[in-house]
Amino acid sequence: MNEPITYRHWLAHVTPKAAPAVATSTVLILGRIWNANGAEHSIGNATLMVVLAAGAATAGAFASAGRRGGSVIAGTAFAASGGLALAGVAGYADGLSLPLLLWALTTAVAYGLAARYWRTDRRDTVAYERRTIERREDHAHIERVEALRAGAQIEVARESAAYATALAQALTHRAALPGFDPLALTHAGLPELPAVEITKEH
């Protein structure tokens, strides 16, 4: 049972690893665009982002406590909270130093959270591949045993057919010998042999 070996493109390996950095960089860029369009030192906009970030963090805390949702919802809520906080700082601050510092911190936290899920996913993938290999080896062993058994049965049938052919030829040859009397065999208690016409060549 040979299956085609498939190789993943290098982009398929790199893209998940770059996703946290791409996400935080996108939030930083959008925050700076928002800053250039009037959000700099805007108390109302900063208050809105603080409220949204706090709401997302609270939802993540409730989800992680197990009241509602699960680990995926908690991780998503905390990621949203960090993104909103980064966007608020990037939009409110007048320089780039604080937004870049918060971007680096957010990216590091995002990679820390993502690494945990990557390890779990890798562990599940390795376990699945191990089970698949074990099942494949079991099936291959069963196929080999069945092939050997079928080959032995075919060989026995071939030998039986050859023996039956040789026996029929021997009986036919013996019946063709001069002086062969099938009645003498019958009187001796042997099974009756089929009558064969003996033609002698002159």
Image (tube, rainbow, N blue to C red):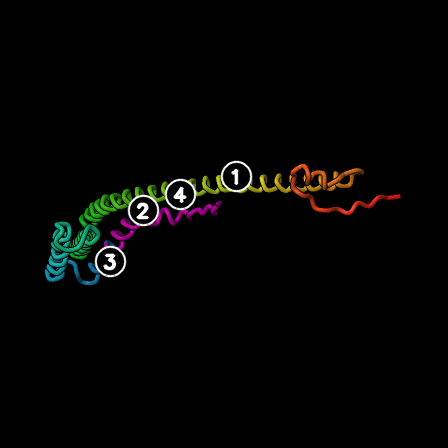
Q: Secondary structure at mark 3?
A: helix
Q: Position of residue 196 (x, y in %)?
A: 75, 46
Q: Quadrant of residue 39?
A: bottom left
Numbered badge on residue 17: 2
* Residue 193 magenta: no
Q: Is residue 164 above or below residue 19?
A: above
Q: Position of residue 137 (x, y in %)?
A: 43, 40
> Viewer-nearest of labels 2 and 4?
4
Q: Amino acid at mark 2?
A: Lys
Q: Secondary structure at mark 2?
A: helix
Q: In the image, what residue occupies the spot 29% across and 51% down?
A: 22
Q: Nearer the viewer, residue 40 or 86?
A: 86
- Image: magenta residue range: 1-27
Q: In the image, what residue occupies the spot 49% across and 40% down?
A: 144
> Viewer-nearest of labels 1 and 4?
1
Mark closest to the chain's N terminus, 4 or 3: 3
Cβ atoms under marks 2 and 4 closer than 8 Å: no
Numbered badge on residue 148: 1
Cβ atoms under marks 1 and 3 closer than 8 Å: no
Mark 3 burial class by Cα count in 10 Å: few <14, some 14-19, many 20+: some
Q: Is residue 109 above or below residue 67?
A: above
> Viewer-nearest of labels 4 and 3?
4
Q: Position of residue 10 (x, y in %)?
A: 40, 47
Cα–Cα span, label 1 and label 3? 68 Å
Cβ atoms under marks 1 and 4 closer than 8 Å: no
Mark closest to the chain's N terminus, 1 or 3: 3
**Which residue is most to the front?**
187
Q: In the image, what residue occupies the spot 31% across and 46% down?
A: 17
Cα–Cα span, label 2 and label 4? 31 Å
Which residue in the structure is indicated by mark 3?
30
Q: Nearer the viewer, residue 56 or 192?
A: 192
Which residue in the structure is indicated by mark 4?
135
